[in-house]
């Protein structure tokens, strides 16, 4: 007797296993994934700091308010309750 031919499910499973072996053969361990994410976080924090500095440089400096003269030295103002 001959060998049994694989059915459709077995053929699909073998294709999926072949694709997995081709594209996902080198899965990273949890420690490697954490290290990669930590490196990415450091990179993003550096980028955020650079962008904050750029924004600060582009933002105009707040205008200084003119000092308010003493109320005693200024011109008299109308006071509803006093006048």
Image (spheres, grey):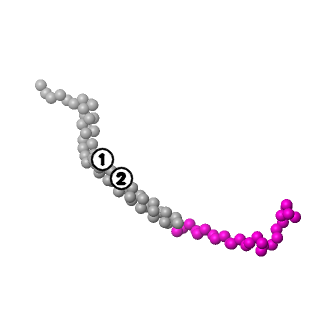
Q: Check the image and name the residue furthest to the top.
A: 1
Tell me: 49 left or right of 65.
left
Q: Residue at x 61, y 68 (%)?
A: 62
> Which percent across, then down, holds residue 14?
24, 37
Identify the image quadrant of residue 72: bottom right
Q: Residue at x 25, y 48 (%)?
A: 26
In the rendered structure, find residue 37 and report the number of the disc placed on it: 2
Q: Quadrant of the N terminus?
A: top left
In the rendered structure, find residue 17 and report the number of the disc placed on it: none
**Residue 42 sits above or below residue 60 on the image:** above
Q: Check the image and name the residue furthest to the bottom.
A: 73
Looking at marks 2 and 1 on the same chain, the residue that comes earlier in the sequence is marked by 1
The local secondary structure at tag 2 comes to helix
> Which percent across, then down, holds residue 43?
39, 59
> Which percent across, then down, holds residue 58?
54, 67
**Residue 25 sits above or below residue 54 on the image:** above
Tell me: 10 left or right of 48.
left
Identify the image quadrant of residue 2: top left
Q: Quadrant of the C terminus?
A: bottom right
Q: Residues within 10 Å of mark 2 (few under 14, many from 20)?
A: few
Q: Residue at x 27, y 35 (%)?
A: 12
Tell me: 4 left or right of 9.
left
Q: Residue at x 49, y 66 (%)?
A: 54
Q: Check the image and name the residue furthest to the right.
A: 83
Tell me: 81 left or right of 36.
right
Residue 23 appears in the rendering: no
Q: Is residue 59 magenta?
A: yes
Judging depth in this view, the residue of 11 and 38 nearest the camera is: 38
Please give the residue where the numbered disc 1 appears in the rendered image. 30
Magenta residues (range):
57-83
């Amino acid at each position: 007797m001959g060998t049994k031919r694989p059915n459709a499910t077995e053929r699909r499973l073998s294709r999926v296993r072949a694709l997995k072996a081709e594209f996902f053969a080198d899965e990273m361990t949890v420690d490697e994934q954490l290290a990669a994410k930590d490196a990415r976080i450091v990179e993003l924090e550096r980028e955020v700091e650079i962008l904050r500095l750029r924004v600060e440089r582009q933002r105009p400096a707040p205008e200084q308010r003119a000092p308010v003269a003493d109320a005693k030295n200024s011109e008299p103002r109308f006071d509803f309750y006093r006048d």
